[in-house]
Image (spheres, rainbow, N blue to C red):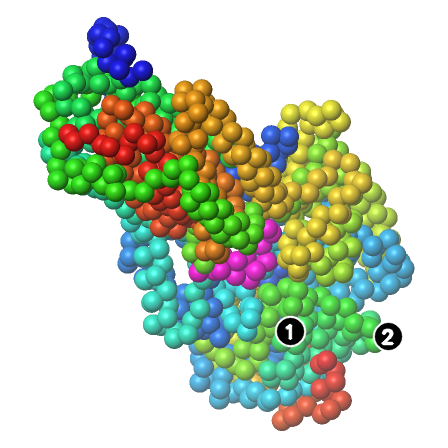
């Protein structure tokens, strides 16, 4: 059929139109690139890569809200055996940070005014606020006992634990209520700073905020460097002082620095590899120049379109995208290898001959990348879009421009002749018995390997932070007794008060867990603003009890006190939200959410503190059973489950994809189709076996990589079948060069510090190698006699 | 998290301050320390264990009459304070390094604060012990101290809090005495005042078994 194509004159007009139109596209992208690089903000948040629960938008809102609180916060904890040396170490740390001119500043602690204002805000509602223990105590107490206690407190020295006038809080209930609110963290003010005692050490907590941009494109780790200097200074001042640092900016900066390094190694490594291959294979200048242009256009277009569609480009996308180089240059290589193999043909005619095969190759690669975007992970979709646009950009550049710009002849080199000629010596599977025996042996070996495969869908595959950062983070959370941001209850209700009431029902159950020691406590909005019913009953209770106590004290001491007046109206959520007093708990309120069938339209979060045993979480989660509107959310568990589900689905899709590709090939190549398909099929099975033998657990990312392997690997089979008669050895040259550069790119991706990308790269590293080695084994017989260029 | 920590700072700043204040008169009873360090060291003799009787007159906002109470006390340096009110009600306040609790006539105890549950208690109690040990450096961190001689053997000592958290509650504590602390006067920001007079003070070097049991 290529013979027919070659004899037909090529219509130049559509081609010209395409070339100019493509130039216009490139100009637009270039303009966008200009603004993009000046104002760009790459996304570093791993959460951005995770799927959103479309069934429950409030879960996503809650997660984001909890995360937004801490995006700029760095927490440093300095521990020493005694308070004086802890202070010395902290002073040394502060001085080192100040002199390092790091983009950090100490967060302001609550000032005296904030303290007074918050007390003043709550004072009118003091009678409506009780802790669960106080409520029980007041309900059960004998009036005489409470009176005795009140009199004893009056006799004791000093003012006692009082935050209000005696007649506004005769039983000193309020300080205990505040103490319960303060249990959100174990850090306490001490000598003008935050401190706590734990593990036999005195700790000083230094809250810092980053002042600079979220992260720098330069890949510097200014915060980490400054913190290291601070730690060294603290250790110099107090040998053996422990310094822990945690916070989102540290992870973000680490990710940015790593990504910067990886984009550079993978991107430039691949570019260098491709250029070296092109240099070795083609003696002329044009191939080298044009290949670079096609890569540049592909990557620029990928960046622009991704930024345009997603608003932001995630750093991991650029890391993954850097490996695109190895894929996108396949088309150009195929073109130039064919030019070399058919020196007499005018470029345009040659291109029109190559187009069907190139198009099919592009289609399979695009399908491979599209498969990557099927799971509902925004990060994967971004990578898929980036890659599809990137290879399509390189493809169009090759097809629309190369024939016009490329002039003269593409002379071969000794290297290209060596590869072209090498095909003759390469073994080939015939129809004999040997073929069957070899296949049976390979299949048995693979089956043995695959039998050992382990499955692991742990979400932590996405976490690329080093262990020391993760450990320090966990340690800080434990020492401060912070609530877990990834496991919580979401409470929905038809109205604000409905939400609060449902929270209180949940809290009653959680209180039992707290009593059992399973939990240290919880954080809930209704702790700060109880439901109207709860406020009314607590107000009635305190009025009854306190009126009695005051009357008793009056009688005993001969006084005539009256209980202070409180606000007759309840504390409402709106009032609270409008006041600075809500600073601590505001993130717990999600607010209005889309109305659901059960009529719920508002939601809040109830967080857990100090979970004793994380294995008991499913049990704690059952606290929500039977409570309307209460739902347990475990981000780690649900995303891991999602990863597992999609690993399964994508595995089935991969099998279906193989069948579909085989059918598509059969449609074009008839009975020879299996020769194009076999190398990829063998590589898929072989890779699974190799991964299992290497002890790599099977994850969604391996399966996705195998889908991509199908898209890329088939190209090589296609190239070899396409040029069967016209440019036998040249097709082989294109396959060798293409596979080598793709292999290099994904091989470099296997060095990534992000486990997901690493397993992706590793899978393709194995896969492409096998495809490259296997493809010529399945070449059609005619390919054994290459034409000499 | 800043929000949470701020809230805690807020709430506990209030508590730590009020707790330290609640405890300070009892502790100051035996251990003033000051700028005129030498003066005090010459005139004030601090025994490891001191016991005696007290009379306390509290003037509280909203109360027509002053609240007068009488009882006995025991201060053991580094170990604790036992403050036993006999009149008009039987009640005992105990401060140790880790706890602050009341003991009722029936022997039952009620925790006002526990260092395990509330870390601020430990700081408060450390403050008390630094007062007891006449640790001037530690006191000078938290209080501006002015000491003045009175006559040939007497002295007064005015402690003004430097720590703004404490200053929100405590305006001034004034101690006066000779070989022993004789009076302590507390002025609260809320307008309440407390005057404590000590008498029948008896120094000792160690606690008896019985006394040690009171601090547990």
- The x, y position of residue B166, in whole percent, is 55, 62
Q: Depth check: give the residue in front, B72 or A592.
A: A592
> Which contiguous range is marked in magenta?
A468-486
Q: Depth check: give the residue in front, A89 or A384.
A: A384
Q: Quadrant of the C terminus of chain A?
A: top left
Chain hosting mark 2: B
The residue lying at 72 percent from left, 28 percent from top is A600
Q: Depth check: give the residue in front, A653 or B65.
A: A653
Q: How many marks?
A: 2
- The x, y position of residue A341, in whole percent, is 19, 27
**Residue A263 vertical position relative to residue A519 in the rendered view, above or below:** above
Q: Depth check: give the residue in front, B57 or A360.
A: A360
Viewed as shown, does residue A47 lie left or right of B191? Answer: left
Instruction: Report if residue A482 lies within the magenta region.
Output: yes
**Residue A615 vertical position relative to residue A656 in the rendered view, above or below:** below
The residue lying at 20 percent from left, 38 percent from top is A421
Q: Quadrant of the N terminus of chain A?
A: top left
**Residue A425 vertical position relative to residue B205 in the rendered view, above or below:** above
Q: Look at mark 2 in the image and give the residue it sits on.
A: B106
């Amino acid at each position: 059929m290529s013979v027919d194509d070659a004899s037909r004159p090529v219509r130049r007009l559509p081609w010209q139109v395409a070339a100019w139109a493509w130039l216009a596209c490139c100009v637009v992208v270039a303009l966008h690139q200009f603004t993009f690089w000046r104002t760009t903000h790459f996304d570093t948040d791993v959460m951005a890569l995770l799927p959103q629960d479309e069934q429950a938008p409030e879960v996503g809102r809650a997660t984001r809200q909890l995360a937004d609180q801490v995006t700029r916060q760095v927490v440093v904890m300095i521990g020493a055996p005694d308070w004086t040396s802890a202070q010395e170490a902290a002073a040394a740390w502060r001085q080192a940070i100040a002199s390092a001119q790091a983009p950090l500043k100490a967060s302001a602690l609550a000032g005296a005014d904030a303290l007074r204002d918050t007390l003043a805000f709550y004072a009118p509602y003091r009678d409506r606020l009780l802790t669960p223990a106080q409520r029980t105590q007041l309900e059960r107490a004998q009036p005489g006992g409470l009176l005795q206690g009140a009199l004893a407190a009056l006799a004791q020295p000093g003012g006692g634990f009082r935050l209000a006038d005696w007649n506004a809080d005769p039983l000193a209930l309020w300080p205990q209520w505040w103490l319960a609110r303060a249990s959100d963290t174990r850090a306490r003010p001490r000598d003008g700073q935050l401190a706590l005692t734990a593990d036999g050490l005195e700790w000083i907590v230094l809250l810092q905020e980053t002042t600079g941009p979220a992260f720098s494109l330069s890949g510097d780790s200014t915060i980490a460097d400054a913190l290291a200097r601070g730690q060294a200074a603290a250790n110099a001042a107090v040998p053996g002082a422990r310094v822990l640092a945690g916070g989102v900016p540290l992870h973000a900066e680490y990710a940015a620095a790593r990504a910067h390094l990886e984009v550079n190694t993978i991107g430039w490594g691949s570019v260098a590899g491709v250029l070296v291959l092109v240099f070795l294979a083609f003696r002329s200048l044009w191939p080298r120049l044009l290949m670079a242009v096609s890569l540049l256009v592909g990557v620029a277009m990928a960046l622009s379109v991704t930024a345009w569609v997603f608003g932001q480009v995630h750093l991991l996308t650029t890391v993954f995208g850097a490996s695109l180089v190895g894929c996108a240059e396949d088309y150009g290589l195929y073109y130039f290898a064919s030019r070399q193999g058919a020196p007499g043909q005018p470029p345009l005619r040659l291109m029109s001959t190559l187009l069907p095969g190139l198009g099919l190759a592009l289609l399979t690669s695009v399908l491979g990348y599209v498969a990557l975007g099927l799971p509902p992970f925004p990060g994967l979709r971004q990578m898929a879009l980036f890659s599809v646009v990137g290879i399509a950009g390189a493809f169009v550049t090759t097809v629309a421009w190369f024939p016009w710009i490329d002039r003269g002849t593409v002379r071969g080199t000794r290297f290209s002749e060596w590869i072209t000629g090498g095909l003759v010596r390469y073994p080939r599977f015939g129809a004999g018995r040997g073929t069957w025996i070899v296949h049976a042996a390979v299949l048995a070996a693979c089956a043995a390997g695959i039998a050992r495969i382990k499955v692991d869908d742990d979400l932590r595959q996405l976490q690329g932070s080093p262990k020391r950062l993760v450990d320090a983070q966990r340690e800080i959370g434990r020492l401060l007794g912070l609530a877990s941001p990834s496991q919580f209850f979401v409470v929905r209700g038809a109205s604000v008060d409905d939400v609060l009431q449902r929270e209180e029902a949940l809290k009653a159950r959680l209180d039992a867990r707290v009593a059992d020691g399973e939990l240290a406590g919880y954080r809930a909005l209704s702790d700060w603003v109880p439901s109207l019913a709860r406020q009314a009953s607590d107000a009635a209770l305190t009025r009854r009890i306190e009126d009695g106590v005051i009357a008793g004290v009056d009688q005993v001491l001969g006084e005539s006190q009256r209980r202070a007046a409180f606000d007759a109206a309840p504390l409402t959520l709106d009032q609270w939200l409008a006041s600075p007093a809500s600073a601590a708990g505001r993130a717990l309120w999600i607010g209005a959410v889309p109305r659901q069938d059960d009529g719920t339209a508002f939601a809040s979060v109830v967080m857990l503190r100090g979970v004793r045993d994380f294995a008991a979480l499913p049990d704690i989660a059952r606290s929500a059973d039977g409570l309307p509107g209460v739902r347990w959310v475990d981000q780690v568990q649900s995303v891991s489950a999602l990863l597992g589900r999609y690993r399964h689905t994508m595995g089935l899709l991969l099998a279906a994809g193989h069948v579909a590709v085989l059918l598509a090939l059969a449609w074009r190549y008839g009975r020879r189709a299996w020769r194009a398909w076999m190398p990829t099929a063998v590589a898929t099975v072989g890779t699974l076996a190799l991964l299992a033998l290497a002890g790599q657990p099977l994850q969604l990312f391996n399966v996705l990589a195998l889908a991509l392997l199908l898209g890329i690997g088939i190209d090589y089979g296609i190239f070899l079948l396409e040029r069967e008669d016209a440019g036998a050895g040249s097709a082989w040259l294109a396959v060798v060069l293409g596979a080598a550069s793709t292999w290099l790119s994904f091989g470099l991706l296997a060095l990534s510090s992000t486990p997901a990308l690493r397993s992706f790269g590793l899978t393709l590293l194995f896969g492409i190698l096998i495809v490259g080695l296997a493809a010529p084994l399945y070449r059609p017989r005619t390919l054994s006699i290459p034409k000499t260029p | 998290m800043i929000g949470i920590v701020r809230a805690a700072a807020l709430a506990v700043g209030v508590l730590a301050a009020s707790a330290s204040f609640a405890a300070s008169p009892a502790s100051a009873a035996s251990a003033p320390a000051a700028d005129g360090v030498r003066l005090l060291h010459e005139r004030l003799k601090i025994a490891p264990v001191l016991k005696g009787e007290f009379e306390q007159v509290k003037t509280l906002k909203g109360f027509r009459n002053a609240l007068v109470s009488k009882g006995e006390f025991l201060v053991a340096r580094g170990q604790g304070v036992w403050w036993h009110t006999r009149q008009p009600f039987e009640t005992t306040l105990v401060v140790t390094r880790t706890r602050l609790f009341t003991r009722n006539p029936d022997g039952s105890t009620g925790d006002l604060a526990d260092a395990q549950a509330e870390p601020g208690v430990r700081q408060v109690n450390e403050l008390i012990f630094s007062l007891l040990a006449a640790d001037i450096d530690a006191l000078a961190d938290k209080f501006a101290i002015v000491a003045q001689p009175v006559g040939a053997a007497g002295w007064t000592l005015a402690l003004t809090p430097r720590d703004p958290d404490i200053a929100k509650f405590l305006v001034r504590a004034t101690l006066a005495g000779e070989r022993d602390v004789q009076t302590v006067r507390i002025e609260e920001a809320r307008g309440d005042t407390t005057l404590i007079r000590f008498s029948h003070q008896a120094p000792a070097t160690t606690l008896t078994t019985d006394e040690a049991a009171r601090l547990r």
